[in-house]
Image: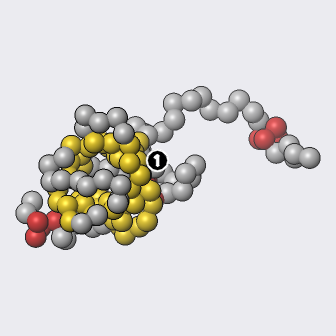
Amino acid sequence: MSSVDTRNVARDSLFLFAQLTFAGQAKTYRVKVRNLSAGGMMAETSEVAASRGDRLEIELRNVGTVKGSVAWAQDNRFGVAFEKDIDPKVVRAPVGSTAEIPHYVRSTSAASTFSDDERRIRKL
């Protein structure tokens, strides 16, 4: 897609924090996620200067680690193109939400062994 084509891609404007690590570096940086789409995001940070082409990994809430590269950079903001598409609705969902989460993100732990009555016990 050209840059003109990508302007029509649906993206969610939001404000959340994520952890970013550049390839070949151990240090992580806290970035503000300004908008998010299935194929990428715009981030903002004053901690580090990103350059076009930089490879990175970003830890997104409810999704986990996503690999990508810097598509553009201007001042303290930069765009990230993801290697694989994500579902931006999952990232927007509150932590621990009962919103539909893709099977590859769901916990593999066993279902609760407590009955409905046992789960209703009041804490004093």
In the depicted structure, whether residue 89 falls above or below residue 68: below
Q: Residues within 10 Å of mark 1 (few under 14, many from 20)?
A: some
| The one of 90 and 73 positioned closer to us in this rendering | 73
Horizontal relation, residue 94 to residue 9: left or right? right
Horizontal relation, residue 31 to residue 97: left or right? left
Q: How many labels were placed on the picture?
A: 1
| Percent coordinates x, y for residue 72 in the rendering | 17, 60
| The one of 33 and 88 positioned closer to us in this rendering | 33
- Colouring style: secondary structure
In the depicted structure, whether residue 111 falls above or below residue 46: above
Q: Is residue 96 visible?
A: yes
At horizontal 35% and vertical 55% (from top left) the residue drawn is 47
Q: Residue furthest right?
A: 124
At horizontal 38% and vertical 43% (from top left) the residue drawn is 28
Q: Is residue 36 visible?
A: no
**Quarter of image, res 120:** top right
| The one of 22 and 39 positioned closer to us in this rendering | 22
In the depicted structure, whether residue 90 falls above or below residue 105: below
At horizontal 16% and vertical 65% (from top left) the residue drawn is 6
Mark 1 highlights which residue? 62
| Percent coordinates x, y for residue 37 in the rendering | 30, 60
| Percent coordinates x, y for residue 15 in the rendering | 43, 65
At horizontal 25% and vertical 60% (from top left) the residue drawn is 78
Horizontal relation, residue 97 to residue 48: left or right? right
**Quarter of image, res 46:** bottom left
| Percent coordinates x, y for residue 116 in the rendering | 77, 41
Q: Amino acid at mark 1?
A: Asn
Q: Which type of secondary structure does the marked residue at label 1 adopt? A: loop
- Pick the quarter of the image with the N terminus: bottom left
